[in-house]
Image: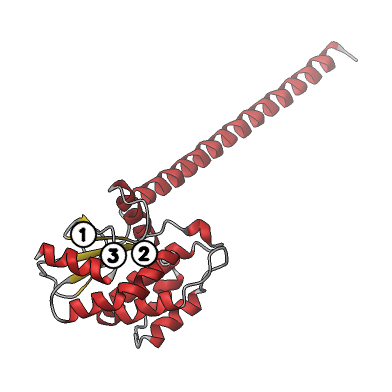
Amino acid sequence: MSNESKKKAQAATAAMQGKDKKRRTLIQIGIAVVLVALIAVIGFSIASKNSDSDAPAAAPSSTQDNGAIRIGDPNAAVVVSVVEDFQCPACKQFESISGDTLAELVADNTIAVDYRPIAILDRMSSTNYSTRAANASLCVAEADVSAWPVWHKAMFDQQPTEGGAGLSDDELLAITQQAGIESPELSSCISDGTYSDYVTSQTKAALDEGISSTPTVSVNGTVVSNPTPDGLRAAITAAQ
């Protein structure tokens, strides 16, 4: 091969190498751009999730500031507070023993009752029943607080055993229908867990207050150690 042919071949090879280098550079730049964009998207997604988690939980309009559902005179001078978990057997026992007494005292305007549903027994079911039932209680209060006491009693009458799945969403809805509560939003409120985050926040608030068991019953802020009908009446008389 002549010198001139060699030079032409070398020039062609150099040109091809230059093109390959340029192509590799462009590919690398493209990959870098894609990676930067991907990192930005991931960062935005994480930020959005963090922002969502920091957002305050949706609060029902029917509750007191501490998450309680008030039954009776909104301005009652004597208020009995009942912190309860719908999965709690002791809460069921309290309702069966003292529920009628509280209802009578509410009816004659002696007291109001603040029911505070919390969820400390989710571990006792396979479906977080405590949270789901507390959420349902808030859904019912939003739909028709006047019918809430009937629903409340029925919930404890049908309390599921610990360690199982708990009542299904359909069964929770059926109890609202048995209590005569009709609302087009009830089904989705129960199945979507509309107030589940609120239940979690109120459970934490109750624990932060030092409440460590359910039921915790108090009269005007003073815990009643013997919340039987006689014990409640004595505490209520002392508070008047």
Q: Which residue is mark 1?
A: 65
Residue drawn at (18%, 81%), measured in percent from left and top?
A: 107
Q: Nearer the viewer, mark 3 or mark 1?
A: 3
Residue to which mark 3 is pinned: 227
Give, as a three-letter code, the residue at label 1. Asp
Is residue 180 rendered to the left or right of residue 43?
left
Q: Single out the residue that lies furthest toward the right.
A: 1
Which residue type does callout 2 highlight?
A: Tyr
Q: Is residue 121 visible?
A: yes
Task: Name the kind of residue labelled 3 in the image.
Answer: Pro
**Along the viewing direction, whichever of 42 and 112 lies nearer the viewer:** 112
In depth, the one of 162 and 118 nearer the eye is 162
Residue 213 against residue 180 in the figure, above or below: above
User: Does residue 86 appear left or right of residue 99 in this picture?
Assistant: right
Which of discs 2 and 1 lies nearer the camera? The answer is: 1
Say if residue 185 shows up in the picture: no
Q: Which residue is mark 2?
A: 195
Label 2, secondary structure: give it: loop
Q: Residues within 10 Å of mark 1 (few under 14, many from 20)?
A: few
Residue 1's place in the image compared with 20, above or below, is: above
- Using the numbered discs, state the Cα–Cα distance from disc 3 to disc 2 in whole angstroms: 29 Å
